[in-house]
Each structure stands twice: as structure tokens, then as C-alpha cells.
Image (cartoon, helix red, strand yellow):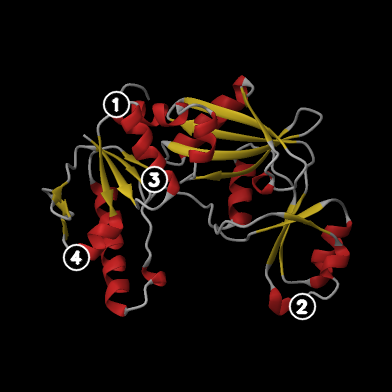
């Protein structure tokens, strides 16, 4: 049995469930909001690993596509916030210990939540990563921005729009406003890659914007990565304990692929719709055990 665990109101989760239905693959969806509101769950981490959510029994030997989100901080009353924390804490522990396939397990070794650490680990893994600086020193930040085209990015894993900055933009910067993460801007085409087991789905993106996600006129074309890079992203994804990951690259004019990040829980529906559901098809194949 394939289970989808997440929020019915979240677009990527809803897309996965709908696409599975369209591809005639049975998937049992578990809406965490409904579970919290019903207050009915029991998860056992131990020998039997039994589980029940909202009256629905879960099979620890099953396959799970998960987008677990803790909405405690968004609740207006303490009781609701506690239920969210209790449920997500218990559920993530259970998912980490069951023998079935979990895409992806909560305990995966992702450092995506800290961009400086993430970029360092990618560079040490052999990927070409643009130079960057993180800090609160006005002098150091201005010097980096003055040395070449620069973008400012989110320091954490929180999604944010990247934009160009120069030394003048940092003229009034105070250390108390930091830290700030700056990265050397690489002109060229964006390449978005989704790795599912040993399958690679790539799209080349042409956009006039610094962050193509803000460009309604961006052009997307399916593409193939060089064989060595495709092997590298598959190997690194698996090495980090992930079965599914979203990679972002910049393809420079000289043909160099610059690695920007790898996301352990990619919001992939936007890309999958353009690819005719092939990413979901690979996910379903992985969860059914029909490919690696």
C-alpha cells in the first residue's frame, strides 16, 4: 500500500494525490489537519510499530510519500498548537523507524536549512559552487559585493526571492541587521533537476529575471544532464539518505554547471505539470518497487 501523508490544502501534496489517481495507482491519503482536528492518533515506536491516524490503520511495511508540516506556530490557541507538536513529533519518530520505504525519512542528513554549511558540503562533494560570504561585517559584505555581480539569498531554508545587490545597497547596513548571505551571481540558464531513485528529470529554464520563479515569461525545456553530472546527483542524493530531491544548477555560457542547492522536500508540482506527470510517475514507480 502507498500512503501520502501531508496537507490536502498544500499544492504539491494535492498534486501527487491527484496525479496518482489519474495514473490509476491506488494511494491512501492522510490529511494531517484532519488528524489534528479529530484528535485521534496512536503511533508506537517499538517492536510492533503499530499506527493509527484518524481511525485509519497504517502499515509499517507500506510505502510513504511524506510532506509533514508542523503548523503549531500558526495556531491561535495553545491546545491546537500542542496537538500539532505532539502529532508531528510522534509521526516523524515513527516514520524514521518503520521498515517500509519513506520518501523522504525525517532523519535524512540534509543541511539545506543552513546555506553556508550546505554550500560547503556540496563543494566538498565535488560540485562547482559559486563563491559566497556570510556575516555581519559591513566592510566584508561591501567588499564582496564590490568584487563582482552578487545576489543576496536566504540564510536558512525559508523560501525567499534572490536578487542582485551591490556595495551601494549595503552602505547603511548595520551589524545588528545581520547575518547576511551573499553569493557570486552566475549569469546563464537555470537548470532544475528532480532525482527519483535512479531517474533524472531535468528542465532548462531561460529567464530575464535573476530568480526565474518570479518571471511569468520564463521558458522551460526538458533537457538531459551530462552523463557524469547525472551520475553524480543520483549518487549524492542516495548518499544523503534521500530517494527524492530537487537540485538547482546554473549553466554558464562556457558550459560549466554551477550547483546552487539540493532540496530534500521539493515542491515539484509546477515542474511536473509541464513534464506531463513524469516526475510523479517515477515517484509512484519507486514507491511501488518497480524501479530503484
| Callout 3–callout 2 Cβ contact below 8 Å | no
Q: Quadrant of the C terminus?
A: top left
Alpha carbons under labels 1 and 3: distance apart: 17 Å
**Pointer 4: what residue?**
39
Compared with 206, 291 (above or below) is: above
Alpha carbons under labels 1 and 4: distance apart: 31 Å
Q: Earlier in the sequence, mark 4 or mark 3?
A: 3
| Callout 1–callout 2 Cβ contact below 8 Å | no
**Pointer 3: what residue?**
13
**Pointer 1: what residue?**
24
Alpha carbons under labels 2 and 4: distance apart: 47 Å
Task: Using the image as rendered, state which of residue 64 and residue 270 is in the foreground.
Answer: 270
Q: Earlier in the sequence, mark 1 or mark 4?
A: 1
Q: Residues within 10 Å of mark 1 (few under 14, many from 20)?
A: few
- Residue positioned 42% across, 40% down in the render: 242
Q: Is residue 139 visible?
A: yes
Alpha carbons under labels 1 and 2: distance apart: 57 Å
Q: Secondary structure at mark 3?
A: helix
Amino acid at each position: 500500500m502507498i500512503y501520502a501523508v501531508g496537507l490536502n490544502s498544500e499544492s504539491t501534496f494535492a498534486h501527487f494525490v491527484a496525479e496518482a489517481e489519474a495514473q490509476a495507482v491506488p494511494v491512501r491519503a492522510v490529511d494531517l489537519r484532519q488528524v489534528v482536528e479529530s484528535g485521534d492518533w496512536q503511533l508506537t515506536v517499538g517492536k510492533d510499530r503499530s499506527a493509527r491516524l484518524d481511525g485509519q490503520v497504517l502499515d509499517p511495511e507500506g510505502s510513504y510519500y511524506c510532506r509533514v508540516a508542523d503548523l503549531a506556530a500558526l495556531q491561535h490557541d495553545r491546545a491546537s498548537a500542542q496537538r500539532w507538536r505532539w502529532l508531528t513529533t510522534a509521526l516523524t519518530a515513527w516514520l524514521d523507524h518503520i521498515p517500509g520505504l519513506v520518501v523522504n525519512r525525517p532523519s535524512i542528513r540534509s543541511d539545506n536549512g543552513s546555506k553556508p554549511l550546505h554550500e560547503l558540503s556540496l563543494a566538498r562533494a565535488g560540485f562547482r559552487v559559486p563563491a559566497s560570504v556570510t556575516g555581519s561585517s559591513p566592510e566584508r559584505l561591501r567588499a564582496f559585493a564590490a568584487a563582482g555581480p552578487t545576489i543576496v539569498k536566504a540564510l536558512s531554508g525559508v523560501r525567499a526571492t534572490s536578487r542582485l545587490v551591490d556595495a551601494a545597497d549595503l552602505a547603511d547596513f548595520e551589524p545588528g541587521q545581520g547575518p547576511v548571505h551573499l553569493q557570486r551571481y552566475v549569469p546563464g540558464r537555470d537548470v532544475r533537476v528532480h532525482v527519483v531513485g535512479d531517474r533524472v528529470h531535468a528542465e532548462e529554464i531561460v529567464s530575464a529575471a535573476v530568480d526565474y520563479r518570479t518571471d511569468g515569461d520564463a521558458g522551460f525545456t526538458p533537457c538531459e544532464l551530462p552523463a557524469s553530472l547525472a551520475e553524480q546527483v543520483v549518487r549524492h542524493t542516495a548518499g544523503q539518505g534521500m530517494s527524492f530531491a530537487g537540485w538547482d544548477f546554473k549553466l554558464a555560457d562556457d558550459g560549466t554547471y554551477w550547483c546552487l542547492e539540493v532540496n530534500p522536500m521539493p515542491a515539484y508540482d509546477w515542474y511536473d505539470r509541464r513534464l506531463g506527470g513524469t516526475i510523479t510517475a517515477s515517484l509512484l514507480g519507486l514507491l511501488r518497487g518497480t524501479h530503484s
